[in-house]
Amino acid sequence: MVAGISLALAASLTLANALGAKPGRAATLIGVLVGLTGFLGSVTQLLRDKLTEVPRWQRATYAVVIGCVFAGGVVVLLRFQAPPPPLYRLTGPQDVAVVGFKNRGSGQEQQLLDDVSSTFAQALSKALPQGTVVHDYATQYELPLTELLHGDHRRLDSRTRKFVGQSNAAILVGGIVTPGSGGQINVHPAVYVRADQVPDAPELAGWYTSAPVPADQSLGLAHSRGALVAELVRQASGLAQFTSALDAWHSGRTTEAVAGFARLLSGKGTSDLDSGTGFVTSDLVHLFRGHALEQTTVNGQAASRSVLEAAGADYRAIPADSPIRRRAQLSLASNVYLRAETATECAPGALRDSDIAGVTSTLRRLMSDANFTTLGRLKAAVNLAQVEYCRINAGLTSDDGTIDALVRRVRAAGPGVGVRELKALAASIAAQREADRGQLEAAISGIRQALALESHFVLRAQWLGWLAAWAFAQCHLVTGDQAARDSLDQLRNAFRTGAASRQDYEAGRKYLDQQRNQAHTQCGSGSPR
């Protein structure tokens, strides 16, 4: 018995070490097989040589006990291993995490690519503005960047979000190394945009790849590696400006963000010798500037029509073969609708189907496109609900249940980055629908559900204004007064952060005063609710 237990403990220690040391998959498999084979072989031999005269049930009991000791030893040893050291945490608003370069059939050893990552991080740190920290995480955290080469990269997205939470990196850069023509290799630069950097368009968050940088010699050669690193550093030169523009957008300073993106575009070279497009590509900048331009119109900071047209021009500047074409198509469809809605307010006789030609079909295609992101498909669905709602109000189509089906689809979506905001928007559409049907109690309940999911000052101000108007219409004066005060509080905060103008605040205050005065006149003291 003692010998068997000793064998079990020794075998469990071997197996635990193999599992805990995190070697390669092949080495782990070999370690597991060796441990199990040694353990089972030793116990079998012991049963055969020493316990032949023992009754079968006792031998079975003995085997079960030894197996439990073995399994328990593995669990205990793994449970009490020293935890891995925490990741180096970045603290600056423009700090960069270099997450390495992953091999995909290029013939380059991963250790060599890790060396390239380290060299690149050191060189990039010297090239970016003083105070920007660049840290190399290539050997500290595994991100399956090669998933970017095919449609499904949910595992990469999940691990990236976890990495961002641990490292607090403002921006992530890395790449994929693939074989090229005639023995060359191609390095595909990749950059990650955090969801909290694009709060008004969470579907823009994620990884973006750009045109490959070719190398005609092994990266093990000093000259080849130096040339590649120099080119990658050159292409990364816009990262600081890009993160500054994102930070301005995130903070509600959308006019400043637009100017920052414009400077990036003006800095793009036009020479045939200006190789590559950079980690921050022109396509990416056009996409983000378009959204920032649209946000200035929402915030009342610019003349809507001309700015919306400029945003549409940005989206159209993204070619049909761009890796971000689906995001661009979604943005352009939404832009066409937004321009039509702004000009006509969806009034009967004012809006024509030709004003939004192609929008419905584009959104239907994108919401069913398996190669589009989950969040992108949900955004297409909620945008389609908005378009159909506008068309119904304009008398261009009848209510066939499409909107309700789209709203249910979005509200039934699982958790994820950006999903909460889309669920809030869907709930607000459902609340509007209830109000149109005269079901104001249901509308109030629905808009409260939307408010519970939305944090942005401007939207909360708008929705609280609806709540106030619906409450006043039912003579719920206490509820209406409170909602009106809350709406103006949100507008004041939006003005303070640059997300709304003084004119927005004054218009909101005037509207709510009219609703309140009318309700107090018609309802008297009103309901205590």
Image (spheres, helix red, strand yellow):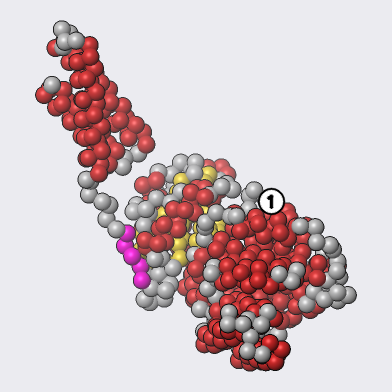
* Furthest residue toward top: 53
| Residue shown at 84% from the left, 62% from the top | 398
Above/below status of 108 relative to 166: above
- Mark 1 Cα-neighbour bin, 10 Å: few <14, some 14–19, many ≥20: some
| Residue shown at 59% from the left, 48% from the top | 151
* Furthest residue toward right: 349
The percent position of residue 503, horizontal first and vertical second, equals 64, 91
In this rendering, position of residue 47 left or right of residue 518: left
The percent position of residue 481, horizontal first and vertical second, equals 59, 86
Which amino acid, mark 1? Ser
Above/below status of 248 relative to 368: below
Q: Which residues are magenta?
A: 87-91
Query: Is 143 one of the magenta-colored residues?
Result: no
The quarter of the picture where residue 263 lies is: bottom right
The percent position of residue 426, horizontal first and vertical second, equals 64, 64
Asked whether the viewer can see residue 334, the reply is no
| Residue shown at 44% from the left, 53% from the top | 159
Q: Which residue is mark 1?
A: 368
User: Looking at this view, is 421 or 363 the one in front?
Assistant: 421
| Residue shown at 82% from the left, 64% from the top | 357
